[in-house]
Structures are given as structure tokens and as C-alpha cells.
Image: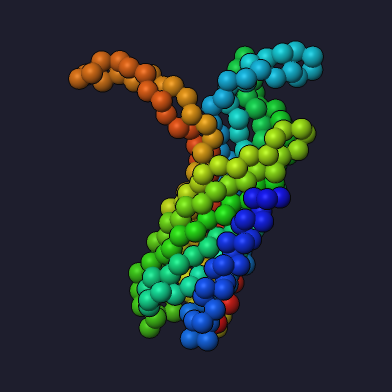
Amino acid sequence: MKIRTLGFLGLLIFLITSGPARAQGRFEVTPFGGYETSGSYPINVYSQNGGIIAPVDKLRVNDAAAYGTFLDFNLTENAELEFMWNRNNTSFSARNTLTGDYSKAYNSDIDQYQFGGLYMLRNTEHRLRPYVAASIGFTHEGNDGGTPDRTAFAYSVGGGVKYYLSRHLGLRADARFMPTYGNSGNAHYCDPFYGCYTARVANYLDRGSFVGGVIVHF
């Protein structure tokens, strides 16, 4: 609950600081819906399934419908600041090392809060305006089944297109690569110069997000 409160507080600050520019037509709200792919990262635990204790080597968040909103503030004709909230009502599955099969572990409500920006590749003379985008923030998992909630660093890179039907209304399609930090572990590497060695690496839940929505421009 505290994490969600911080997310909405950030949203409120974004709205307040952009308030003076709303009258100038520099503010956009885009409710969206779409789809987010599955993603997994390695773990090393044991689970009990049907009375049998078996090793688990991977945790996967399952693909699910996504919904949320973009809030954008125009800095220039082509550059925008952006806040994104993206929510999935999904579940996690664990992979049995012995069989390679996945089984459901617990349900999870995943909220992604990210701050960043985008850059339009065409000016305002065009109705169709492709863009590139990037952001950083955090992901909060509200887990059930006695599994602790989790909050972790996240970021996104991608792009999309906006099509303006009128001065105040438009359509938007957005596609992004959205990794969330999972855990850290040791990995074994070999190269011709330094030989073989062990290094600490970060493992991420690598997911893809594909959404579309209606732009309301003020």
C-alpha cells in the first residue's frame, strides 16, 4: 500500500508542476489497454507439490492483459516528459528442475510506475507522429498465497506512433521492452584472453508491452 501511495504521489506532483502549461495545450492523458508478455529469471529454491519436494530453477511471470495510462507534458514541439502506470493482473509459475514443467505458484497484481520521456520524429504539421521513448522507475508485485510483496527497479525502451484526429483528440500505439530486476547470481564466463572466471550478474524479468489508447490533449 505504501508503494502505491508513493506512485500516486508522484503522479500528483507531475500534475501540479505541469498545471500552468495546460492552458497552452501542452498536456496529454492517454488511458490504454493491451498485452504484456511473459518473462522469467533463475532462482534456486525447493517447493512442495503433491507431497513431493522438488528443486525449482526458474520463476516465470505469465503473460496477461495490461491497462493503465500515460501522462505527457510537452517541453518542446518534439520532446515530452512522461509518467506511465501499467498494471497486470497475472500469476507466477515455477519450473520443476527434474521435469522442466511449470506449475502455478501464486497470483500477483503487478503495477509498474515509470518516469521518462519521448521524442517525436515529425513536427506538429503532421497528424501521424512516430516517436522513441525511454523511462526508469519501479515495479511493485502484490502477491497472494503468503508470498511476500516485492518492489524492484525497472526501466523501459521502445517507441510507437501517435495519430491526431483533431486538436484535442488522437490515437496512440506503444511497444516497449520493459525489464524488472529479479535477483543477482554468479555466472561462469570464458574468453581467450582471461580464461574462465565467475562474475556477479543481475537477472531481469524481460517482458514486452504492447498497448494502445485514446489521447486527450489539453
Q: Percent x, y for residue 24?
A: 48, 86
Q: Percent x, y for residue 216?
A: 58, 77
Q: 214 and 74: which one is in front? A: 74
Quarter of the rendering containing residue 146: top right
- Tell me, yes or no, if residue 75 can be seen here: yes
Q: Quick check: 74 above or below 66?
A: below
What colour scheme has been applied to the protein in the rendered image?
Answer: rainbow
Instruction: Name which residue lies at 59% across and 64% down.
Output: 11
Instruction: Name which residue lies at 26% across and 20% down.
Output: 191
202 vs 44, left or right, is left
- Tell me, yes or no, if residue 86 can be seen here: no
Q: 5 and 70: which one is in front? A: 5
Q: Percent x, y for residue 177?
A: 47, 49
Q: Percent x, y for residue 71?
A: 55, 68
In the picture, the quarter occupied by the C terminus is bottom right
Q: 71 and 6: which one is in front? A: 6
124 vs 171, left or right, is left
The total of numbered circles placed on residues is: 0
Instruction: Name which residue lies at 45% across and 32% down.
Output: 202
The residue lying furthest to the right in this view is 51
Quarter of the rendering containing residue 95: top right
Q: Quick check: 14 above or below 192?
A: below
Instruction: Name which residue lies at 48% across and 32% down.
Output: 203
